[in-house]
Amino acid sequence: MTDRKDQLAGNLAKVENRIAAACAVAGRKREEVTLIVVTKTYPASDVRILSELGVRHVAENRDQDAAPKAAECSDLPLSWHFVGQLQTNKVRSVLGYADLVQSVDRSKLVTALSKEAVRTEREVGCLIQVALDAEESGRGERGGVGVGGIGELGDLVAGAPGLRLDGLMTVAPLTGPYAGRQQAAFERLMDLSTAMRRTHPAANMVSAGMSTDLEQAVAAGATHVRVGTAVLGVRPRLG
């Protein structure tokens, strides 16, 4: 376990240095960017080590993996983010541990999240997942709503009991006009965030950037970066 802790500590230090350097280049303060470590496919023991190393935000994208892991780590001072495509039949389980759902992309999901949040007397943070590879109001290849659907969905979340509209999230698209143009994609997300904050001033969270493109996300103004591989190592194949 000591070897794994040393490995994770070293990786975490490298990522911290990358974020700090990117903030310096962008003229931003380091504390303006929150690191979320994506722990999908990795065991609860790694989550425990990360917590010992000072990580406070972790993310998962598959409820069947996340639920038992979160239960095993329920004694730790962590905020759990759900970042995967979420089916309504998984909402009850996900809200058993997630403090924030970053992948809200349709009205049916908002309704289900609100119902469960009210039932459990919780307030759950929500990010609208923006699909920059989608038609104006369509759905993206990896989930998310097209640019034209953001306003209506944001209003729906903001007005839903038990939910809190925290901001926007995107994944750099693999197709469409922003394919291979991560910084342009993230800058577009920032423009959309500015527009949303005119009607919802508190929705100031912008989640963008992963292991390979966190620098571009920081340069664009992201408040949160989601890093997995660069901290935990190359993931084992699923299936």
Image (cartoon, rainbow, N blue to C red):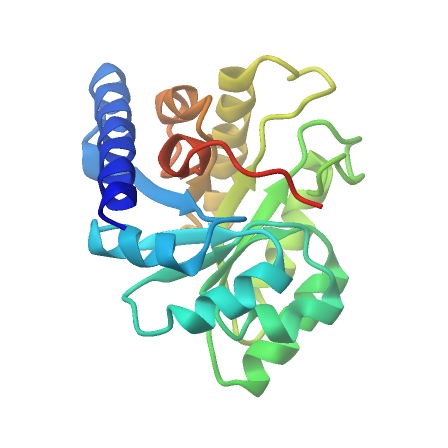
Judge whether 211 appears above or below 97 on screen: above
The image position of residue 37, as x and y in percent, is: 39, 44
Quadrant for residue 144, please give it.
top right
Judge whether 153 appears above or below 92 on screen: above
Judge whether 230 appears above or below 46 on screen: above
The image position of residue 5, as x and y in percent, is: 25, 45
Q: Residue at point 22% right, 47% down?
A: 2
Residue 152 relative to residue 46: left or right = right
The reply to whether residue 98 is visible in this rendering is: no
The reply to whether residue 91 is visible in this rendering is: yes
| Nearer to the camera, 231 or 110 | 231
Judge whether 68 appears above or below 219 on screen: below
The image position of residue 133, as x and y in percent, is: 72, 27
Quadrant for residue 185, please give it.
top right
Q: Residue at point 44% right, 28% down?
A: 211
The image position of residue 134, as x and y in percent, is: 76, 31
| Nearer to the camera, 128 or 154 | 128
Q: Residue at point 74% right, 18% down?
A: 176
The total of numbered circles placed on residues is: 0
Q: Residue at point 20% right, 19% down?
A: 24
Residue 36 relative to residue 157: left or right = left
